[in-house]
Image (spheres, rainbow, N blue to C red):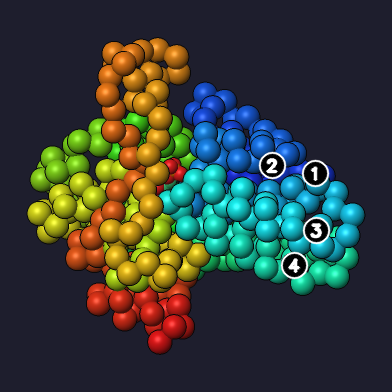
């Protein structure tokens, strides 16, 4: 199978001094490209999941700092540095759980602050943002290859949410492993859980795998134990929004349930993520900030009522899978195994 990433529309791109994103809220009906030319538009696109997935919001946020500098036109270096600090704060707070967002905007802010004129600050910010996007593409390739080797002989892969090319500058993290298997001519098929309430699995994972000619079967979120019991799953691979020092991992709500089910069924459960998704400053998953989303996402679907209007809701966007349920973490630096506190420390070079 020939998979050519350069022939596809990127999820986030820098075009004519503006950001262009695929509006993921419109998929699978429409492949709409939306231009983001203000900080408000960047924050709004991130918040309403028009751009989503930890690496993609990191990339969009990073380029958003440049858009913000252009919008504010600082007259001198002091103003430009003040603008940077402000933009890092505003954009970095658009969503709280994926550490990639704050990590990216801070990285761009730090790299740019050393410039000695407003235009140098702007060009440094842009160079850093583009560098970070290139690095993400390389990281995806390495994750794909490391995962492909690790999962030799396992071809029925279950996944949750969407972790492919829509979420990264490359082929993705968990789905990066699937694409690497397909590209190597190995048998692979995917069980994709719907991912309620916003249906990232149904709308996005099925769309992008279908587009690449990879066999994919859509399943309800609540069917994972049954699918495993029926022998439909050799391994589970999910992405991550934040992996903390002990390996506890925040990812899309529902991930924890799949991990519990996999343990019960004796099926390996993998997390795939790049170094940018690790947050060693937090000791355990208890301290990961979990985003709570609006009720409307549960009580309506595209304007149609799916629950009583005034229903009380609890709508956490993410859950935390305890490290003890994770078989291994697939990264661009190779496979991290338990005890994760040690393997994470040595990967991040903080030993
Ligand atoms: O709320 P979303 O759709 O941004 O959540 C995305 C996920 O949970 C992904 O699994 C994660 O960000 C990894 S994307 C490579």
Q: Is residue 168 above or below residue 112?
A: above
The answer, for residue 219, to whether it is visible in the render is no
Q: CA distance from mark 4 to mark 1?
A: 17 Å
Q: Quadrant of residue 51?
A: top right
Q: Earlier in the sequence, mark 1 or mark 3?
A: 1
Q: Are marks 3 and 4 in contact (CB under 8 Å)?
A: no
Residue that badge 1 annotates: 71
Q: Earlier in the sequence, mark 3 or mark 2?
A: 2
Picture mark count = 4
Residue that badge 2 annotates: 39
Q: Which mark is residue 113?
A: 4
Q: Earlier in the sequence, mark 2 or mark 4?
A: 2
Q: Position of residue 70 (x, y in %)?
A: 81, 48
Q: Is residue 129 above or below residue 298?
A: below
Residue that badge 3 annotates: 80
Q: Is residue 53 above or below residue 342?
A: above
Q: Quadrant of the C terminus?
A: bottom left
Secondary structure of the residue carrying numbered label 4: helix
């Amino acid at each position: 199978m020939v998979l050519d990433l350069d022939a596809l529309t990127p999820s986030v791109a820098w075009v004519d001094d503006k950001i262009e994103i695929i509006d993921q809220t419109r998929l699978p009906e429409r492949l709409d490209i939306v231009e983001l030319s203000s900080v408000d538009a960047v924050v709004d696109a991130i918040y309403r999941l028009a751009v989503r997935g930890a690496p993609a919001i990191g990339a969009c946020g990073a380029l958003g700092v440049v858009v913000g500098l252009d919008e504010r036109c600082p007259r001198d270096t002091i103003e430009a540095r003040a603008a940077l600090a402000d933009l890092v704060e505003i954009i970095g707070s658009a969503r709280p759980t994926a550490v990639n967002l704050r990590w990216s905007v801070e990285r761009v802010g730090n790299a740019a602050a050393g410039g000695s004129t407003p235009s140098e600050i702007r060009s440094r910010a842009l160079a850093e943002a583009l560098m970070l996007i290139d690095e993400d593409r390389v990281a995806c390739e390495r994750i794909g290859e490391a995962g492909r080797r690790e999962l030799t002989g396992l071809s029925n892969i279950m996944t949750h949410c969407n972790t492919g090319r829509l979420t990264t500058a490359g082929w993705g993290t968990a789905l990066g492993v699937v694409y690497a298997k397909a590209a190597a001519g190995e048998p692979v098929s995917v069980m994709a859980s719907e991912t309620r309430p916003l249906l990232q699995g149904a709308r996005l994972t099925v769309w992008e795998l279908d587009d690449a000619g990879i066999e994919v079967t859509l399943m309800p979120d609540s069917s994972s134990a049954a699918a495993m019991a029926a022998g439909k799953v050799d391994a589970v691979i999910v992405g991550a929004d934040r992996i903390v020092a002990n390996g506890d991992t925040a990812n899309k709500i529902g991930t924890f349930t799949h991990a519990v089910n996999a343990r019960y069924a004796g099926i390996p459960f993998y997390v795939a993520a790049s170094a940018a998704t690790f947050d060693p400053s937090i000791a355990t998953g208890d301290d990961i900030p979990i985003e709570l989303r609006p009720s409307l996402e549960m009580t309506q679907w595209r304007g149609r009522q799916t629950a009583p209007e005034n229903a009380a809701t609890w709508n956490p966007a993410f859950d935390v899978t305890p490290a003890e349920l994770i078989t291994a973490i697939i990264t661009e630096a190779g496979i991290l195994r338990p005890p994760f506190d040690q393997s994470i420390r040595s990967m991040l070079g903080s030993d």
